[in-house]
Amino acid sequence: MEPVPFMNLSRQYESIKEEVKSAMDDVMKITAFSGGPFVQKFEESFAEWCDTKYASAVSNGTEALHMAMVAMDIKEGDEVILPANTFIATVWGPMYMKATPVFVDCDPDTWEIDVTKVEAKITSKTKAIIGVHLYGQICDMDALIAIGEKHGIPVLEDSAQAHGATYKGRKAGSLGDMACFSFYPGKNLGTFGEGGGVTTNNKTYYDRIQLVKNHASEEKYFHQELGFNCRMGGLEGAVLSIKLKHIDKWNNRRRDIAKAYQTQVTNDKVKMQAQPEYSNSVYHLFVVTVDDRAHFMNYLKENGVFSGMHYPISCHLQKACAYLGHKEGDFPNAEYLAAHCVSLPMFPELRDDELAKTIKVINAY
Ligand SMILES: Cc1ncc(COP(=O)(O)O)c(C=O)c1O
């Protein structure tokens, strides 16, 4: 048997090839390459799917975070609270505005932002709190929103890994003041190229993003403020509209794979992310921790199973964040996760025989 891939995007392409080709052809026929009707159609259907009033499509998830910061008027010297264990793009958001990222450690079991440590970080300079739905599991948003409301601070969801996840039955993207999504190819909803989006029920935020993402220009060649060019391309929008029709089925397959790992991996050297009652994850990644990661990953590889690491260095210890003056030991749970995490094969097209082999190999470790 061929080795089990960590991820395989071509299988998904094969399953929707004809639909996608025809949608791409429609874009090319009317040369709607930048923004345009295909992007607008995707924005409308994505907002509806997320149960929000508005969705603004942008060029990638990092720009979604950047545009959300612009919409909230984050400025130099402001502080933005966020978890230390996330993909670095969450941190770029405040850094692009010359605001200070203020890190919070994660919970040792759910690996989501430890909501009991957030309030102590609030100062008169705090202008936003970002909750990251890590690996597809929604963080404790009600707790973050309660803190936000008490102090008059907006709460942003980084939903880049959580398209379709629910929290107490409500969809990722509809919980905070705004939410940022990535449509990077490997994401649960990924385009062919780059893409991102911001969902919100707040018209002021939405209007501002629609304006600034397009050179801050409502009327051609008239620019109302500092603008950016981070529109979504028409081909990306068209692909996303096709994929949106399939995502619920793909997310359910991810949940079935996760259930198999949770119930059939019996090796107690392997620890899994705790799944709180309130959260129904979409398992963008299936991450476990082991004592000796290098040994385990090498063992998996030698036995024909590929794995990954998300993420091997906590953000507070990244060179790019050295100016913040953090040191090892500042966020022990995030550091533990960074040093011990291993991502197992997880994508909807993972075959049953590949899943069975992966579980067997893990149990024999
Ligand atoms: C948590 C998180 N935030 C933000 C991003 C940034 O998205 P993108 O790669 O589309 O810029 C990603 C994805 O890479 C992510 O995983």
Image (cartoon, helix red, strand yellow):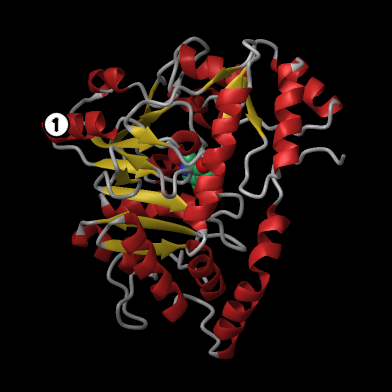
Q: Amino acid at mark 1?
A: His
The quarter of the displayed image where residue 192 is located: bottom right
Image quarter where the N terminus lies is top right
Q: Could you say whether the residue bearing mark 1 is in a helix, strand or loop?
A: helix
Residue at image point 35% right, 46% down: 172
Residue at image point 67% right, 70% down: 17
Q: In the image, is residue 353 above or below residue 50?
A: above
Left or right: residue 127 compared with residue 274: left
Name the one closer to the observer, 319 or 195.
195
Q: Does ligand 1 reach within 8 Å of label 1's beta carbon?
A: no
Residue 76 position within the rendered picture, expressed as x and y whole percent measured from the top left = 31, 41
The quarter of the displayed image where residue 265 is located: top right
Q: Is residue 6 visible?
A: no
Residue 15 position within the rendered picture, expressed as x and y whole percent measured from the top left = 66, 63
**How many other residues sit within 10 Å of disc 1, few (<14), some (14-19) or many (≥20)?**
some
Residue at image point 81% right, 28% down: 301
Left or right: residue 185 compared with residue 50: right
Q: Is residue 240 visible?
A: yes
Q: Tell me the residue that label 1 is attached to.
A: 151
Residue 308 position within the rendered picture, expressed as x and y whole percent measured from the top left = 68, 32
